[in-house]
Amino acid sequence: MNSEKVIFAFFIVLALTLNFGFFLGGMDDVNHHNIYELFAAIVVSLISTVLKVGDRTHLGAVFLATSLVADLQLIAAAIVWGYTANVMGDSLGGHSLATVISLSGGALLANLISVVLLVSETITVRR
Amino acid sequence: MSNLIYILFRRLRSPLIVLILVYAIAITGFVIIPGVDDQGQPWEMSFFHAFYFVSFMGTTIGFGEIPYAFTDAQRFWTLITLYASVIAWLYGIGVLLSVFQDPAFRQQMRRNSFIRRVKNIREPFYIICGYGDTGMQLAHSLSDSNIFSVVIDPSEDRINELEADDFRTMPLSLCDDASQSEVLEIAGIKHPWCQGIISIADKDTVNLTVAIVAQLLNPDLRLIARAETPEAEANILSFGANEVINPFETFASRLALSLKSPSLYCLYDWLTGAAGQCMREPPVPKHGLWIICGFGRFGRALYDHLDDEGASLRVIESDRKIRDIPSGSIIGRPTEADTLIKAGIKDSVGIIAGTDVDANNLSILMTAEEVNPDTFRVARQNEDNNSHLFQAAQFDMLMQRGNVISNTIFALIRTPMLGDFLRIVSRFKNDRANELVSRIIGVVRDDVPELWELRVCEDETPALFKTIKKQQVLVEDILHGELRLEHLEQKRTLSAMPLFLKRGSGNVLLPENNRIIRAGDRFLMCGTYEARNEMLRVVKNINVLESLLCGRQIPAGWLFRKILKVNCTREVREEGVNNE
């Protein structure tokens, strides 16, 4: 067992699960979506990006790309949330909430690809 | 480039993760810990405010407690996270700086910038492998005549020396082993502007490898290599090298030449000497008994060449165990007067100090002078930094390994036809050589002579190329003898002469005055600097050339030509001389 592999897989899967947890719920109800979960998803996604950076293989490059997509989508979602809540002074709902959730949905897809890559890489390793 | 980013992020991975974690924990803490607003009402910090506060706290900017004054619990958390974030930042910046200090990283950066700059070269350049004494002199000569060069040497000290040196055009340099094909490739061996590769490393094996790699990667490239043993010389030549220079052989053959034909020696010395040097009075060694001190590579080469000239030779060698030493040799220290007297210094006409220790060579010749002041003294100088000593001693002839090689290579680079010319001239009898030298001296007189090449083609000599399609142009018309230049009031003698002509695969030595110039001809010219400039003007400017051929001024414009009805074609003559 390689501890580096464990940490790597842990962060990639955690990024997916947190993202999924945040995404899950109604598109029009802010109570279904926890802001702490979004924050955690961003932090974990950033960490997994840093873990992927510096891998010279082709697979490593794809990992990095999907991870960067997830970061971008999640940070965009956070900015929309923060701007609506603090600058416009509205409570989150309607159009802004839908934007936040669909952005996180896109990130979810990117994270899903990461996990698929991880699983397929694991399967090719001969025991 | 990708290599650099790879190394950078590899090393920055853990500081970045630490930074992200510290920020995440600090922000979460501020969001969770309850605060109060200015009205004393309970207030919870949003992620937006927490991120804002942590951002300026972590970077020690510190705008204050925004938006409301903190409670004691918040201040407590600020204390903890403040130090944590500052430490995380310091850690990250420390690692970043150490990456930039890292020798491997710096080497990679230098290499990348080297590759980029080689790719951007848009002028003819040469690759020099090896930056010892020879390489240094050669790089300076090339840069002084505005020829760009790329230098490769495995020693970092030498590359640093190069970078600290003053050059007119700074050569590109790379600290690496030239015998690796990859290194030669990034140095531009396949570059369209690469003119040739000069391998002058200390070791013959390196030069041999460079020759092989160059032959494999770019067989059309001009290759000039240095070799110190006859075996290596033959080996490198077999890999398609154009010229191989063995400093010992070169010098020994020159010395033998000065015995055989002083004027040929003089010609050689001048043609392959340092640029801008006047033709010198040749040294006059005599036939008779020659003493060779030291029977290493240099001694052997001398022995072979002088033996061919029929000089009687005696070798002094201090090493008893040396093999195949000629009979009648003296075993002993040549630095002692007794040994020299035993070898017959009193009756000798010349002595050659050819050991590989400079101090010994100096001492041998000093002692020899005391015993026999009339003897011809030849010194071998091994170390470049001893040149002041050797110059002060004023020996009759001095062999500097670096100079011999770098001057020869430089002459070959500037005028590639020189190699063939010298090979033909070396077979000359004494009378013919004397005649050649006196003709050259007659042309250049007291000036510093120059050598240059003239190629009849559209790029280099457009005017001449155009004209010879329409009418016959003879050698005497533009290249030699009396020409009507400038305002055509009087004829002037052009201080230049063609030495050598290459037409297809044929070689013509000293082309005759009535030879017709054809497209594709290559002339090796010799003359004064002014004559060179004048000639280049003539062959490039169609107006000057036509005026010259007509013998009077021709208007440049079409209108005046029509008005004056200028007709400048001469009757066609048959070419009387066939190619040799």
Image: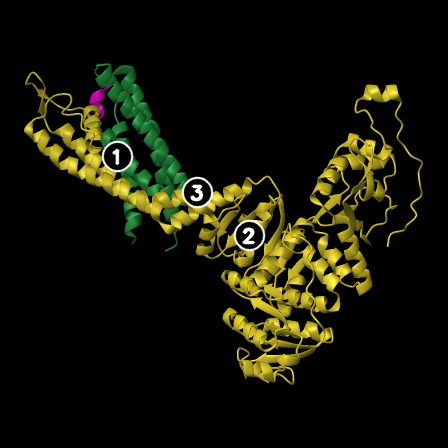
Residue B130 inside the magenta-drawn segment = no
Which residue matches tag 3?
B2
Tell me which residue sits at (86%, 32%) in the image.
B550
* Chain coloured yellow: B
* Mark 1 secondary-structure assignment: helix
Q: Disc 2 vs disc 3: Cβ atoms closer than 8 Å?
A: no
- Asked whether residue B490 is in view, the answer is yes
Which residue matches tag 1?
A43
| Left/right of residue B539 with respect to residue A105 in the rendered view | right
Tell me which residue sits at (50%, 57%) in the image.
B177
Tell me which residue sits at (19%, 24%) in the image.
B49
Q: Residue B507, percent across and down?
A: 81, 53
* Mark 2 secondary-structure assignment: helix
Q: Which residues are magenta?
A: A29-34
* Chain coloured green: A
Q: Nearer the viewer, residue B579 or A33?
A: B579
Badge 1 amino acid = Val
| Quadrant of res B38 | top left
Q: Nearer the viewer, residue A20 or B424?
A: B424
2 or 3: tag closer to the N-terminus: 3
